[in-house]
Amino acid sequence: MTVYYPAYAYGHVGAGQGAEPTVINLAHDGQISVWFRDDTPPSGTMSFDLKGGRLHVFIGEWQDDDGPGGAPPVYTFYLSAQPLSLAVTTKWQQASIDVFQPSAWTLWVDEGLGKPLGLLMDTPQQWGFALVGASGVPTGLLGVDTFRAVPEPATAALLAAAALLARRRRR
């Protein structure tokens, strides 16, 4: 099966040189939210078509300690059990998916690393979107913006309570 990766990150993503890295922790952030749109130029030479593929979220880790020519790399990747609900048009649209529960993930591929899902959910080395099940090569440009991992409801309530207590103590 051919898989396409329209947007992904390796390691932690920073907001600029010298900025603190943005860390996602899916063990605490229960929902992934992202905005998509068709960014294909209106020239008429290309149309936007995902060829029936569905966008899933993936997390994983890849290790190649001795580099090219040495032992083969080892890796483990998980794929969201459900695809993002998405009808791409030229207007920005938000899509989100719940990922807090282990049942929200399926083991996609494991080539010797054997990394458990619970460890990968806590600051995954690689994460992003995978276009799975396309009947051919997708065409067009997919715009991706404002990727967020949102705390699951219980964690969000605890964070709000902590912020309120901290605010009261400062008075």
Image: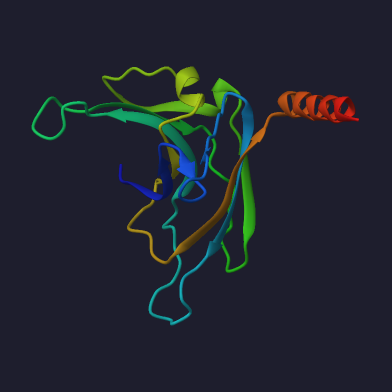
The residue positioned farthest toward the front in the image shown: 171
Residue 141: quadrant of the picture? bottom left
The percent position of residue 41, horizontal first and vertical second, equals 46, 76
Viewed as shown, does residue 134 lie left or right of 159? left
Along the horizontal axis of the image, is 5 left or right of 32?
left
Q: Residue at x 80, y 29 (%)?
A: 163
Picture mark count: 0
Whether residue 114 is situated above or below residue 61 in the rendered picture: above
Res 109 quadrant in image: top left
Residue depicted at 55% across the width and 21% down the height: 102
Image coordinates of residue 61 in percent, x first then y, are 36, 29
Side (left or right) of 90 relative to 138? right
Q: Residue at x 30, y 20 (%)?
A: 113
Above or below: residue 132 compared with residue 113: below
Q: Quadrant of the N terminus?
A: top left
User: How is the structure coloured here?
Assistant: rainbow
- Residue 43 lies, in percent from the top left, at 44, 82
Q: Position of residue 140 (x, y in %)?
A: 42, 67
Q: Is residue 170 above or below residue 47?
A: above
Left or right of residue 107: residue 27: right
**Residue lying at the far bottom of the rendered structure:** 43
In which quadrant is the C terminus drawn?
A: top right
Q: Which residue is rendered at x = 64% and y = 30% of the image?
A: 30
